[in-house]
Image: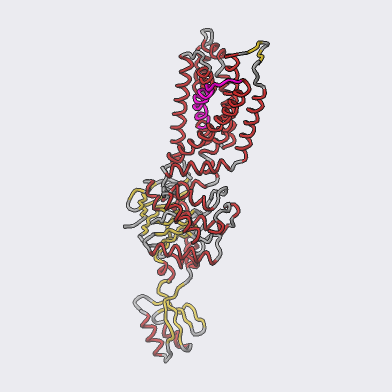
């Protein structure tokens, strides 16, 4: 059963259409990235799921139930983009407070808070006020409050913002651990390299409209393009290859080839072998998610 | 229940860190202490010597007025952040992402604001009570009956200011709350009420006056009932209707606060 389902979800602020007919499903153990420029509608989507704002039209189901059932939020861990923590509180007390808001009993609350303070490397500083914490430490507290109730769904808006590379990796590994144990994650981030590592699927939205959706692997493998590394480059290779496709780029012994429909990588191997040249490697050509994202957003413009 | 207590705990911690709260509290205690210095077994008011039961009545009334006044000021101060404090700093996003209904949230916050304001009123009346018990050498607990009735006043000012803060900016809401409190002194004046209700006054003026009496929260009138009950004075049926007016006003305020807050987007 999908943990989150949205059907034709739209949100309008006056004349501005912040989100237009967004449809997606988030399955158990899956991590889905919401990508888009500032104001694309990512945070709006997250707030709609949490009922912080109401949709203009469309429906949202969380664990098969209407998202307005407040008890469902027991199963959701949310980390906003700029988490406003109670700065007047000590880190430990702040986490205990969030534990109370989740309805955890005293024993569970204390156990979870201690576990998380250790995991987030904050145990030694647990009795310091949050306003004495660095930005990165505050972000770790904010992340800890999102997972304190061991939720089934994580909604994370820029989860690694303000963190150093070591803590970014740690947060990624926690998210991975949770998704491996069946938790679903909806993540928004501007660090697209991280999304490539963290997420299984992505939805690219721009000005509220979905412009591309799919598995990360599929998104970053452009059409039918292949990277072929040959033992030596010969001019005749290009003439042969142009019968089955198009050479897009030549970089020393490395060729980037786009195949015409009906041809397969096997045809490349045959043509290259005919020219008495060996193939060192052949692989699907992949580009960085960042390039795909820029390209799609540019096209849309 | 744990969640409800969680909200109360959170708001207590928030108010406990505010310097303005301690400033007003300190000023209040100072006033109560200073007024205590004037308590003696012979007080003269308008060249008349007040003694015996009358003296205790006067002292009780002063204590009640002073304690309630500072309780009301604190109620205004706390009321302006009850609904909107966490909205402005966006902490509300984290809080409402937890399994809490908006009604639970706002009721818990209102209850906290009331408990704090009323506790402060109670503390001030206790300080004052200790002073006059020692100085006048009497043991009289009736002041606490008056303070108990005035709890409605505190609940009313907290709810009223919270409601206004959902409509207007916080500072302006505090100002409106303060002005309404002072204005209620005017609507609570008996001779003014008698003038408005007299037959010589045109019907239109009467209607306007009645509307004003209904719109302005009956802070002073509730206060007067508390004073009368505390001092065993006669309480007329009209005065009791002010108590009902106060309770209805409180219910309407709570209903409006919940309705507006539930519709808010964060």
Q: Quadrant of the N terminus of chain A?
A: bottom left
Residue B240 screen position, x and y as percent: 46, 17
SS assignment for the magenta stretch, majority: helix
Residue A242 visible? The answer is: yes
State which region is magenta. B137-158
Front residue of this view, candidates B168 and B222:
B222
Depth order, front residue of B84/B150 = B150
What residue lies at 52% left-to-right and 56% top-to-bottom? Answer: A141
Q: Residue B148 colored magenta?
A: yes
Instruction: Indicate the quadrant where residue A30 lies.
Output: bottom left
Q: Nearer the viewer, residue A143 or A296?
A: A143
Q: Which percent across, then down, holds residue A7? A: 36, 52
> Which x, y percent locates residue B190?
55, 14
Magenta stretch contains residue B260: no
Q: Is residue B53 above or below residue A16?
A: above
Which of the 4 quarters of the picture holds residue B130?
A: top right
Side of B35 where B107 appears, left or right: left
Q: Is residue A54 left or right of residue B89?
A: left
The residue at the point 48 percent across, 82 percent down is A254
Residue B176 can be seen, yes or no: no
**Percent coordinates x, y for residue B238 in the rendering:** 47, 15
Q: Is residue A177 above or below residue B180?
A: below
């Amino acid at each position: 059963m999908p943990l989150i389902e949205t059907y034709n979800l739209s949100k309008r602020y006056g004349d501005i259409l912040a989100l237009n007919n967004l449809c997606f499903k988030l399955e158990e153990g899956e991590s889905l990235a919401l990508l888009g420029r500032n104001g694309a509608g990512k945070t709006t989507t997250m707030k709609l799921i949490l009922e912080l704002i109401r949709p203009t039209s469309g429906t949202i189901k969380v664990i098969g139930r209407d998202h307005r059932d407040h008890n469902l939020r027991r199963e959701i861990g949310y980390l906003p983009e700029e988490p406003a923590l109670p700065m007047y509180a000590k880190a430990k007390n702040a986490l205990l407070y969030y534990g109370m808001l989740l309805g955890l009993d005293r024993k569970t609350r204390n156990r979870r808070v201690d576990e998380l303070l250790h995991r987030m490397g904050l145990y030694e500083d647990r009795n310091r006020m949050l306003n004495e914490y660095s930005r990165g430490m505050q972000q770790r507290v904010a992340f800890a409050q999102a997972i304190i109730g061991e939720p089934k769904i994580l909604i994370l808006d820029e989860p690694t913002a303000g963190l150093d590379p070591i803590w970014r990796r740690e947060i990624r590994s926690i998210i991975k651990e949770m998704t491996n144990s069946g938790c679903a994650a909806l993540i928004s981030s501007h660090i697209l390299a991280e999304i490539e590592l963290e997420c299984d699927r992505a939805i690219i939205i721009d000005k509220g409209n979905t412009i591309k959706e799919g598995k990360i692997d599929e998104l970053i493998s452009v059409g039918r393009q292949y990277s072929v590394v040959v033992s030596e480059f010969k001019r005749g290779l290009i003439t042969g290859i142009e019968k089955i496709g198009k050479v897009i780029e030549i970089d020393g012994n490395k060729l980037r080839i786009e195949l015409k429909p009906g041809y397969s990588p096997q045809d490349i191997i045959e043509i290259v072998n005919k020219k008495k040249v060996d193939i060192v490697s052949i692989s699907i050509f992949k580009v960085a998610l960042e390039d795909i994202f820029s390209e799609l957003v540019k096209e849309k413009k | 229940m744990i969640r409800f207590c969680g909200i109360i705990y959170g708001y207590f911690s928030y108010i406990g860190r505010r310097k303005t709260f301690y400033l007003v509290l300190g000023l209040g205690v100072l006033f109560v202490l200073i007024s205590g210095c004037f308590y003696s077994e012979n007080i003269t008011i308008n060249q008349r010597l007040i003694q015996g039961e009358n003296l205790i009545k006067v002292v009780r009334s002063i204590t009640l007025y002073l304690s309630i006044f500072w309780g009301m000021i604190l109620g205004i101060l706390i009321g302006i952040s009850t609904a909107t404090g966490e909205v402005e700093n966006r902490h509300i996003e984290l809080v409402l992402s937890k399994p809490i209904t908006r009604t639970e949230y706002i009721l818990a916050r209102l209850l906290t604001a009331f408990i704090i304001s009323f506790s402060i009123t109670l503390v001030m009346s206790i300080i004052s009570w200790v002073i006059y018990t020692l100085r006048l050498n009497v043991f009289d607990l009736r002041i606490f009956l008056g303070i108990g009735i005035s709890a409605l006043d505190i609940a009313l000012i907290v709810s009223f200011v919270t409601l206004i803060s959902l409509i207007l900016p916080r500072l302006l809401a505090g100002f409106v709350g303060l002005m309404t409190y002072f204005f209620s002194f005017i609507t609570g004046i008996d001779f003014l009420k008698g003038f408005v209700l007299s037959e010589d006054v045109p019907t239109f003026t009467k209607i306007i006056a009645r509307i004003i009496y209904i719109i302005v929260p009956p802070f002073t009138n509730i206060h007067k009932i508390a004073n009368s009950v505390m001092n065993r004075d006669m309480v007329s049926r009209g005065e009791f209707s002010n108590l009902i007016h106060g309770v209805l006003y409180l219910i309407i305020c709570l209903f409006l606060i919940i309705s507006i807050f539930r519709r808010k987007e964060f």
